[in-house]
Image (cartoon, rainbow, N blue to C red):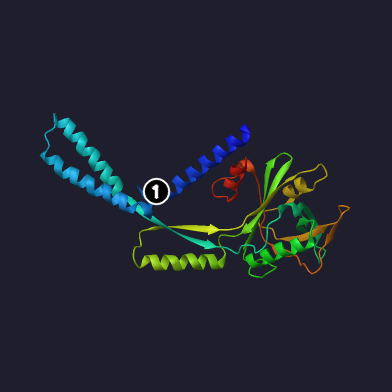
Amino acid sequence: MLKKGKQDIKRRLLLRLNQVRFNFMFRRKRRFFEIVINERYENVVKSVKYVLTIISLISAFLAFKSAFTAFVFGLIIFLVLFIIEKTIFSYCSMYVHPLPNFEIETQKWTGCGFGYATSPNMRGQIPVVSWIFSDAEYAKKIHSLLLEWSYGELKDDGNNICASIILDDEDKYIFFCYPSFARETASDFFNQVEREQCESDKTRVHHKMHMVLMLGKEFVITPKSYLPTFCKRYRERTPYIFRLILSDKEGKTINIEDLPDFVLFDLKIKKRQELDRKDIEYDFIRFRR
């Protein structure tokens, strides 16, 4: 219970820090900097500016004990107003990627498989990544969702589907799969929002928000697992076969009828310590620990 309580406190703190980081941020511009503040605080910032301007005017009629005190007071007012002048505002828009119309049942996703298959021309080997399910009908639902992410294409030339293997510990890894933030419909949506915003104010910063389902599950690296060898062999941006297969009662894997393979074009493989804020998996890992 104590450990769970600490995890809850940590999650709340991380959420609060992310919220502050989202609403207030610094952005370097040439030799100077800008403060980017969410537009919800625009009236507050303008009110502070007006109040300080009035105070600076009134200060001309105030008698300070010394010239130094007057100088310090004026300098403080000047610096605060200077910072406010460097403030620009941000606005948000959200794109919703295809979400499932069925219940997510992670217990039916029982494992992953990794290997290499001989190419049809017998000149090389092709990486193969498999998701193993205990229920064929559920696997078909996941397959349909992936097709929505890839616009119905089994060969995902546009990299609309992202997959990653995050090595969490020496004997554990987490497999993630989610739609790419760069999908064409998402880009079109944000471009349209920016065109409409530019008609009123071109200086504002656009925060692009995505609502996505992120499929992910932790698995154990067994002594017989091929994953360590696969990670050493796989090279970034190498196309690979991505298939959904079934595990029978005896633990043997079999193909699912009428469920064709995908061809994906990049697989991220990283250790947990190598993740940074540019990786979508970064916060997911932090929240679960």
- The residue located at (80%, 46%) in the rendering is 225
* Rendered location of residue 196, percent (x, y): 40, 68
**Foreground residue, 66 or 105?**
105
Q: Residue furthest top?
A: 65
Q: Is residue 124 visible?
A: no
**For this view, does 74 lie left or right of residue 266?**
left
Q: Residue furthest front?
A: 1
Q: Is residue 180 visible?
A: yes
Q: Quadrant of the N terminus?
A: top right
**Foreground residue, 273 or 41?**
41
- The residue located at (55%, 68%) in the rendering is 185
Question: Which image quarter: residue 61?
Answer: top left
- The residue located at (15%, 45%) in the rendering is 57
* Rendered location of residue 160, percent (x, y): 62, 63
258 vs 279: above or below? below
Q: Quadrant of the C terminus?
A: top right
**For this view, does 249 lie left or right of residue 60?**
right
Q: Secondary structure at mark 1?
A: strand
Callout 1 crowding tier (Cα within 10 Å): few <14, some 14–19, many ≥20: few
* Rendered location of residue 234, percent (x, y): 72, 52
* Rendered location of residue 26, percent (x, y): 40, 47
**Foreground residue, 242 or 50?**
50
Looking at the rendered structure, the number of numbered marks drawn on it comes to 1
- The residue located at (71%, 53%) in the rendering is 106
- Residue under circle 1? 28
Amino acid on which the number 1 mark rests in the picture: Arg
287 vs 102: above or below? above
**Foreground residue, 273 or 148?**
148
